[in-house]
Image (cartoon, grey):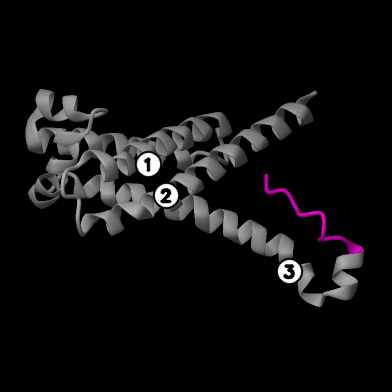
Amino acid sequence: MVSQPRSVGREASDTMPLARFAPALLRVGAFVLRYSLVLFLLVFGALKWTPKEAHDIEAWVIHSPFISWVHTLFGTQGGSEFIGGIELTIAALIATRRWWPAVSAAGSMGAALMFLTTLSFLFTTPDVGDEAGFLMKDLTLFGAALWTAGDALAALTARDEDQR
């Protein structure tokens, strides 16, 4: 459920003709935000099965106080595939919002936690260097995950109220 801003009322559309597009822009924006997050997680999750990606994330993983155990348990390639499986699962959970908003909200919160973890690499990986820019995208993805969680929970609340 996408909430409409207060300024999108009759008086706003009278003084600003473009304001009438606000509800459509909110719907389209919500769709693009949610499913681009899903696509991002699907693509990067699938890449974790490639040896290059496993090697590329190894330094981040082994220096992380949060997920270094993954490398210890599974090694470089196995750890990368484990992380990829989590990303693919989270993507699938977020995509279920229309049918199971609570499941989608859980997936979105999982994504938010994941993006916070990857942002922590900025502080835990020695000589992060050029990769710092690549990791900064996760700040925006963290915001997208929080928004999709809130939207899914709002849809769940609205559905519960409709059933009363």
Which element carries disc 2, helix, strand or loop? helix
Q: CA distance from mark 3 to mark 2?
A: 28 Å
Residue that carries the numbered disc 2 in the rendered image: 139
Residue that carries the numbered disc 1 in the rendered image: 115
Whether residue 68 is visible, yes or no, is yes
Image coordinates of residue 24 in percent, x first then y, are 69, 63
Q: How many marks?
A: 3
Left or right of 41? Residue 156 is: right
Asked if residue 148 is positioned above or below residue 86 in the image, the reply reads below
Crowd band around label 3 with a 10 angstrom C-alpha radius: few (<14), some (14–19), many (20+):
few
In this view, the mark in front (3 or 2):
2
Crowd band around label 2 with a 10 angstrom C-alpha radius: few (<14), some (14–19), many (20+):
some
Residue that carries the numbered disc 3 in the rendered image: 21
In this view, the mark in front (3 or 1):
1
Q: CA distance from mark 2 to mark 1?
A: 7 Å
Q: Specify which label sits upstream in the sequence, 3 or 1.
A: 3
- Report the amino acid beneath label 2: Leu
Image coordinates of residue 131 in percent, x first then y, are 22, 55
